Image: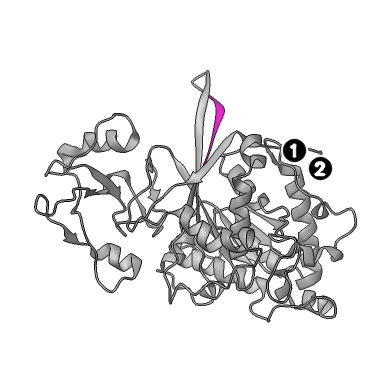
Amino acid sequence: MSKLTCPYCFEQFSLSQIEFRCLGTNPAHCAFEPDEKLARYEKLSGPPIRGRIFKPDSRMWRTLRWRITGASGKALRCVCGERTWEVCPFCHHDLPTGFAEVKTKTIALIGAKHSGKSNYIAVLIHELFSDNIGAKFDSSIFAWDKDWQGEDTPKRYREHFKKFIYDDNFVIPATVSARTKTNKPLVYKFDVTRGATRFGRRGKRKHVSIMAFFDTAGEDLDSIDVMSTEAKYIANSDGIVLLLDPLQMSQVRDRLKDSVTLPPKFTEPIDIVGKTIELIQRFKGLSGRRTKIDIPLAVTFSKVDEILRFFDPGSPLKEASNHDGYFDVSDAEIVSENIKAHLQKWEDGNLDRACEKHFRNYSYFGISALGASPDASGRLEMGPAPFRVVDPILWILHRQGIIPGKRSRQR
């Protein structure tokens, strides 16, 4: 079986490495123990005292496989007789229900400083839960976790994302750097049941992707350590959405300076792409000259509403996408080529050459999470009006084989 990836610390491990925690509530019956691994992951001042962790011996292996893969209703018990729960062997975070039942793919989202990543996460999740996606793809998406303190993804999404954008009509405050605060990922399971042929027989097969949205601050990309959680998040993923701010490009800023309130100048998109390439190469031990990165990369320009004036009236980027039960490959290719042509004008094609040289599969996208700029106080007068926000995610799901794709027109 292929390696599993923890959706919290993003370490990879095999099925046989999964550990178990006793769920007994009486320490007199089964002694509680300090959990040092969980403390390191949570950046706690001291280890929490929780049920004992153990790794099954060879006699338990058959039960272990039944328990995890769903082949039997039997449950693995602690030596004290109490029920247990699967935990990651590296961070000791409880693993989601059914974590290893089906082969899963993971999607990571990273963003440059001031690219609007928090706003994008808020709107993206809202759109993925809409009937527009679920009904068209006959799919389901739901939160897939609860942490050791009982705080789950839906609660974090409501309090830190939805509350601002959809309840109060305000942009989300800047994310505090992960170097000063632990940001836990929002973990979602997206699954589609599609027809499949196996050994000459038609049947149904479930395809699953795990979306772990780790809302680190943009500046973390400037000084990210190759052994950090954020680095594992990026390098061990099966698809990356890289969110870039076009308003950080010098030539774009020069053309907009008299008509748009520009954000402070930070890092050029080409430098963010370079940092991402370097991080993955170092983490995976790849040779920059010979080996291309095989993680699909969706290079996504945010705030596209601010730069649409630069595109021709007939540009497909000025129209909403329509993935009617399949990913529209033709639309994605035309949009990508359109953006690529403008990159040649804006920064001499340096960014595209970097992507072409180092990634086997990449594509360009333009999205707007809000639809228009907020006022000076950060208020969205008309609320969010998202535009093409699901395109990068659907492209990766298509590349992963989760959703079907087809061409809506000839090239």
Q: Amino acid at mark 2?
A: Arg
Q: Is residue 76 visible?
A: yes
Left or right, 235 with respect to 88, comes to: right
Please state, as top left, top right, bottom left or bottom right, where the N terminus lies in the image: top left
Q: In the displayed orientation, state which residue is furthest to the left.
A: 28
Q: Is residue 408 left or right of residue 40?
A: right
Q: Nearer the viewer, mark 2 or mark 1?
A: 1
Q: Is residue 55 above or below residue 268?
A: above
The residue nearer to you, when weighing 73 against 243, is: 73
Q: Secondary structure at mark 2?
A: loop
**Is residue 231 on the magenta stretch?**
no
Q: In the rendered view of the protein, which quadrant contains the C terminus?
A: top right
Q: Which residues are magenta?
A: 190-197
Q: What percent of the width, then of the height, locates residue 291? A: 53, 58
Q: Quadrant of residue 10?
A: bottom left
The residue that disc 1 covers is 407
* Above-or-below relation of 398 to 41: above
| Residue sitting at x 63%, y 63% | 168
Prevailing SS of the magenta stretch: strand
Give me the disc on residue 200: none
Near mark 2 (Cα within 10 A), the count class, few <14, some 14-19 or many ≥20, is few
CA gap, disc 2 to disc 1? 9 Å
Tell me which corner region of the image, top left, top right, bottom left or bottom right, holds residue 9: bottom left
In the rendered structure, which amino acid carries the disc numbered 1?
A: Arg
Q: Nearer the viewer, residue 112 or 340?
A: 112
Q: Nearer the viewer, residue 91 or 334?
A: 91
| Rendered location of residue 382, percent (x, y) | 75, 61
Question: Can you see residue 404?
Answer: no
Q: Residue furthest top?
A: 201
Image disc number at residue 411 = 2
Indicate left or right for 216 with 301 as reference: left
